[in-house]
C-alpha cells in the first residue's frame, strides 16, 4: 500500500458533536479524538512517503518479479550445463575430478558438488584469481561418462550461473555497484513502514463503515461504490500481500549495506548467527579456515594453494561416503582443503524442498569425523533467517515458491499504480492563484496527537531511524520539508 486518496473517501470519521462549555467531554470522545489524530498522522506518513518512495519500490517490484523466477529461468537457459541425458551408474567422484582437472590444470581445486538426482551434472569448482568477488569457476561433468560438458563462472554459495547472477545484481543494485545498493535498501527499509501505515488506515476505515461487524470487508473490495473502487482494490490487494511484503522487506534489509551491518551486529549480540562446523584437525596448529554461512548473495573463500588433485579426488570419495552414512542426504558441496591440518567439509546446500543444512568435517586420510553440525542444533533465529532467505530467493518450495513471489510482485505493482492513479485524479492544479497538491493529507496531525502517543512514536522513530538510516534520514527530511511548507502556508494565510 503506497498512496491513499484523501477527501471524503479517506479522511478520518467526523468528530462527535461539540459539547457545551459547561459539559465535560466523555472519555469515548477523547479516545475518538486521539484515534482521529493518529489516523491523520498515519495518512500523512502513508501519503507523502508513498509519493516519494513508491518509485523505488516499483523498481524493486519489477526486478523482484524477474528475480523470483530466476531459478527456473536458469534451469531453462543453462540446461546443457546442469543436466545430461546419460543413463547408468555414476562414476566415482575421483574420476570426475580428474576429468575436470585435466580441462583446467591451471586452476587450484576448491570444491566439488556431486549431482543429486539422475541426470544432474557434477560441479567441480576451482578458484580463479581473475574473477570478481564471490565468483569461482566450475567445470560441469557428466557423472555417468565422467566427461566434462562445459564450464562457467558460478557466483556465491548458491552457485548461480551468469544469467541468474545478472538478474540477481539487477534486483540488488541495478548493476550500479555500491551506489545502486542505496536504491534497494531505501525500498526495503520503507516498504514495511508504508504498508503498515496503510493497513492502519484501511482497518480504521472499515471499522467506521456500516459493515464494521463483518471482518470480511478487510479482505474483499467494496463494489457498491464505483467512485471508491480504485481505493478499495488498492487497499484490499495490499492487505492480501502484506505478510509476504513484510517478510521480503525484513530479509531484504539483511542484505543491505547500513541496516544489514546493524542486523549482523544484533545477531551476534543475541547469539542468532548461523553456527559453522570446525575444519581444524585435532593436533593441527594455526586457525581453522572459515566455513560460516554465505547468505544468498554472499561468496565463498578461495584456498591459498592447489592441493594434489589425484589424492584429493580419492579422499573426496571417502568423505562423500562418510557424509551419506551420517545422514547428509541432501545435495552436497564438499570443500577441498588447500593445506595439511584441515579437514574436508561437506555441507548440505540450499535447494528446493531441502529443509536442513547439516555439515560434517572429515579427516580425508582416515575417514574419521572430526566435527558435525546438525541443522536441528542451530539457534531458532538462525533457522528463521535461513528460511526467510530461502523464501526470498524463491528456493525453499521450488516452482510454487517462485509463482507465489511472482504473484505478490504483480500485486505490489498494481497497488502502486492504483495509488498513483488516485493521486493523478487529484493531481496538482492551480486553484485561487496557488498550487495545491492533489490528495493532500490534513495538516497539524502531529500537533493534535496526544502526548501519550507522540512520545512512544518519537522514541520508536529514533530507534528505527538509527538502526535503518535509510528510514531515519529521509524521515527527518520529510519532517523538515513539511514544517517549512506549513510555515510558508501560514505566512500566505496571514498576508
Image: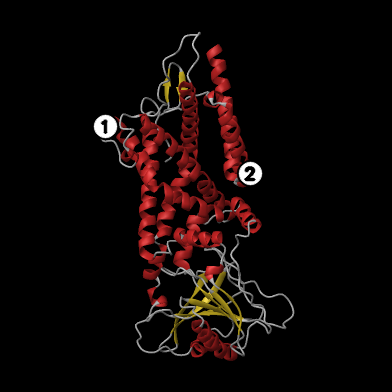
Which class describes the residues within 10 Å of circle 2: few (<14), some (14-19), or many (20+)? some
Q: Position of residue 288 (x, y in %)?
A: 68, 75
Q: Is residue 287 left or right of residue 358?
A: right
Residue 484 lies in what quarter of the image? Answer: top right
Residue depicted at 46% across the width and 78% down the height: 329
Kindly identify which residue carries mark 1: 226
Which class describes the residues within 10 Å of circle 1: few (<14), some (14-19), or many (20+)? few
Work out whether 203 lies above or below 342.
above
Q: In this view, does 187 lie to the left or right of 460?
A: left
Q: Position of residue 395 (x, y in %)?
A: 43, 64
Quadrant holding the N terminus: top left
Q: Where is residue 439 in the image (x, y as percent from the top left)?
A: 42, 28
Along the viewing direction, whichever of 320 and 358 lies nearer the viewer: 358
Measured in 3D between alpha carbons, the distance from the residue under mark 1 to the one under mark 2, in whole angstroms, is 43 Å
In terms of sequence position, does the residue under pointer 1 or pointer 2 come before the other? 1
Residue depicted at 36% across the width and 28% down the height: 9
Residue 142 lies in what quarter of the image? Answer: bottom left
Amino acid at each position: 500500500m503506497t498512496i491513499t486518496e484523501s477527501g471524503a473517501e479517506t479522511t478520518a470519521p467526523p468528530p462527535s458533536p461539540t459539547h457545551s462549555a459547561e459539559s465535560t467531554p466523555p472519555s469515548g470522545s477523547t479516545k475518538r479524538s486521539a484515534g482521529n489524530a493518529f489516523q491523520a498522522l498515519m495518512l500523512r506518513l502513508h501519503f507523502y512517503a508513498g509519493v516519494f518512495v513508491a518509485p523505488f519500490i516499483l523498481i524493486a517490484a519489477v526486478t523482484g518479479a524477474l528475480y523470483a523466477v530466476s531459478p527456473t529461468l536458469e534451469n531453462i537457459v543453462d540446461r546443457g550445463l546442469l543436466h545430461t541425458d546419460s543413463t547408468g551408474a555414476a562414476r566415482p567422484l575421483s574420476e570426475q575430478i580428474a576429468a575436470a582437472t585435466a580441462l583446467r590444470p591451471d586452476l587450484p581445486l576448491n570444491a566439488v558438488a556431486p549431482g543429486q538426482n539422475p541426470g544432474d551434472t557434477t560441479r567441480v569448482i576451482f578458484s580463479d584469481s581473475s574473477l570478481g568477488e564471490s565468483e569461482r569457476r566450475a567445470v560441469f561433468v557428466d557423472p555417468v561418462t565422467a566427461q566434462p560438458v562445459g564450464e562457467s563462472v558460478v557466483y556465491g554459495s548458491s552457485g548461480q550461473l551468469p544469467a541468474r547472477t545478472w538478474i540477481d545484481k539487477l534486483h540488488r543494485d541495478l548493476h550500479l555497484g555500491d551506489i545502486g545498493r542505496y536504491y534497494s535498501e531505501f525500498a526495503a527499509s520503507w516498504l514495511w513502514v508504508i504498508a503498515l501505515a496503510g493497513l492502519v488506515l484501511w482497518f480504521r476505515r472499515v471499522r467506521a463503515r456500516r459493515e464494521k461487524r463483518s471482518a470480511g470487508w478487510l479482505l474483499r473490495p467494496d463494489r457498491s461504490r464505483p467512485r471508491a473502487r480504485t481505493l478499495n482494490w488498492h487497499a484490499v490487494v495490499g492487505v492480501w500481500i502484506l505478510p509476504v511484503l513484510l517478510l521480503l522487506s525484513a530479509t531484504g534489509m539483511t542484505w543491505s549495506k547500513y541496516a544489514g551491518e546493524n542486523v549482523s551486529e544484533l545477531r551476534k549480540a543475541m547469539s542468532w548467527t548461523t553456527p559453522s562446523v570446525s575444519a581444524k584437525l585435532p593436533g593441527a596448529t594455526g586457525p581453522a579456515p572459515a566455513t560460516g554461512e554465505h547468505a544468498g548473495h554472499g561468496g565463498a573463500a578461495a584456498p591459498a594453494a592447489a592441493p594434489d588433485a589425484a589424492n584429493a579426488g580419492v579422499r573426496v570419495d571417502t568423505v562423500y561416503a562418510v557424509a551419506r552414512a551420517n545422514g547428509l542426504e541432501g545435495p552436497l558441496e564438499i570443500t577441498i582443503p588447500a593445506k595439511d591440518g584441515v579437514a574436508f567439509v561437506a555441507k548440505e546446500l540450499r535447494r528446493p524442498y531441502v529443509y536442513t543444512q547439516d555439515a560434517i568435517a572429515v579427516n580425508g586420510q582416515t575417514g574419521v569425523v572430526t566435527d558435525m553440525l546438525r541443522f536441528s542444533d542451530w539457534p531458532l533465529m538462525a533457522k528463521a533467517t535461513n528460511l526467510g532467505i530461502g523464501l526470498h530467493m524463491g528456493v525453499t518450495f521450488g516452482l510454487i515458491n517462485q509463482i507465489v513471489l511472482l504473484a505478490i510482485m504483480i500485486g505490489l505493482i498494481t497497488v502502486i499504480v492504483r495509488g498513483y492513479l488516485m493521486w493523478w485524479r487529484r493531481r496538482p492544479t492551480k486553484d485561487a492563484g496557488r498550487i495545491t497538491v492533489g490528495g493532500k493529507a490534513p495538516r497539524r496531525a502531529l500537533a493534535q496527537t496526544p502526548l501519550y502517543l507522540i512520545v512512544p512514536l518519537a522514541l520508536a522513530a529514533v530507534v528505527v531511524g538509527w538502526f535503518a538510516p535509510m528510514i531515519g534520514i529521509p524521515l527527518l527530511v520529510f519532517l523538515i520539508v513539511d514544517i517549512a511548507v506549513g510555515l510558508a502556508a501560514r505566512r500566505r494565510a496571514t498576508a
